[in-house]
Image (spheres, helix red, strand yellow):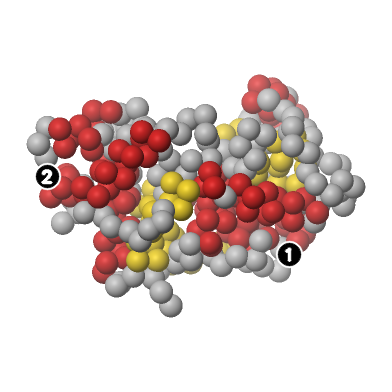
Amino acid sequence: MNFLTRFAPSPTGPLHLGHAYSALLAHDLAVAQKGTFLLRIEDIDQSRSRTEWETQILDDLDWLGCSWPLPVMRQSTRKEIYQTALVALWRRGLLYPCSCTRRDIVAAAAAPQEGAPLTGPDGTIYPGSCRPKTPTSPIAPLPPTGAALRLDMRAAQDALADSPLTFLETGIPTNGRPRTISTTWIEVHSSIGDIVLARPAMGTSYHLSVVLDDAAQGITLVPRGADLFDATVIHVILQRLLDLPTPTYHHHRLIRDEDGKRLAKRDDARAIEKYRGDGATPQDIRRMLSLT
Ligand code: GLU
């Protein structure tokens, strides 16, 4: 089987040290296995994505020594694919429209009968205000466009009753040695809940797009930051529902600043562009990241 890894930046800010670590790791893993490193631009959030950032990111990656086959996959060109998957899930009664605002969710989750509000990979766990009382087959052939669409996790559990929620992990905590990570539906309901699969402004979500795109690119190993570890079970559930393969995941350590805080897009001081301007070489960047 061909060994394919990827780096999937969102062009919403400069490439910083944390991204460089993810990209170089994915690149090095592909080279070590005589596989292929692919690039994908995650630009579904058109309100925040900028072509200037994309140009700079590609230039920085090239400077760091990464190379990839062309063309680069761009999420903004794949809206029909996301819509087709949403319609298929909708027709199986797995989605429901939700018009709650963030404030509504926080208020409903803080109601005394709910206990302390819990947070999951996407923030406050949805308390189910818009969820149909009993899962039913949708009457309309197409989902509504003016509301968010949530995945009904109870319906997903019914649909996947016999399918174990497992994936192979080669990153943290074993670093190299493959290990099976399993999750139970009880954990899914209590720590994830009904996540949003499509927002009206985007027509999709990170979770839905990433799963469809990794499958379309034939990715066999996904290297990404440990901050996404808790989201991986969402991706496994979507892969099972959409009949897509589950790649191996390699969650890696996060690059932090001197205060131990994880680097964010706004950390321009650690932008690769800035280091380049100060005369650093790609080898200097690798040394800073303990990648030799
Ligand atoms: N676009 C995502 C990010 O920049 C990639 C997440 C992933 O690798 O799945 O964080």
Residue found at the far right of this picture: 139
Mark 2: C-beta under 8 Å from nearest atom of ligand 1 = no
Q: Position of residue 182 (x, y in %)?
A: 55, 62
Q: Is residue 96 left or right of residue 120?
A: right
Which residue is painted at 38% across and 62% down in the image? 5
Name the image quarter holding residue 15: top left
Q: In this view, does 219 lie above or below 113?
A: below
* Residue at image mark 1: 161
Q: Is residue 104 left or right of residue 64?
A: right
Name the image quarter holding residue 116: top right
In front: label 2 or label 1: 2
Q: In this view, does 272 lie above or below 66?
A: above
Cα gap from disc 2 to disc 1, whole angstroms:
52 Å
Q: How many labels does the image show?
A: 2
Residue found at the far bottom of this picture: 1
Q: What residue type is labelled 1?
A: Ala
Asked whether residue 291 is in view, the answer is yes
* Residue at image mark 2: 281
Bin the neighbour count of mark 1 within 10 Å (Cα to Cα): few under 14, some 14-19, many 20 and up: few
Bin the neighbour count of mark 2 within 10 Å (Cα to Cα): few under 14, some 14-19, many 20 and up: some
Asked whether residue 227 is in view, the answer is no
Which circle's residue, 2 or 1, is located before the other in the chain?
1
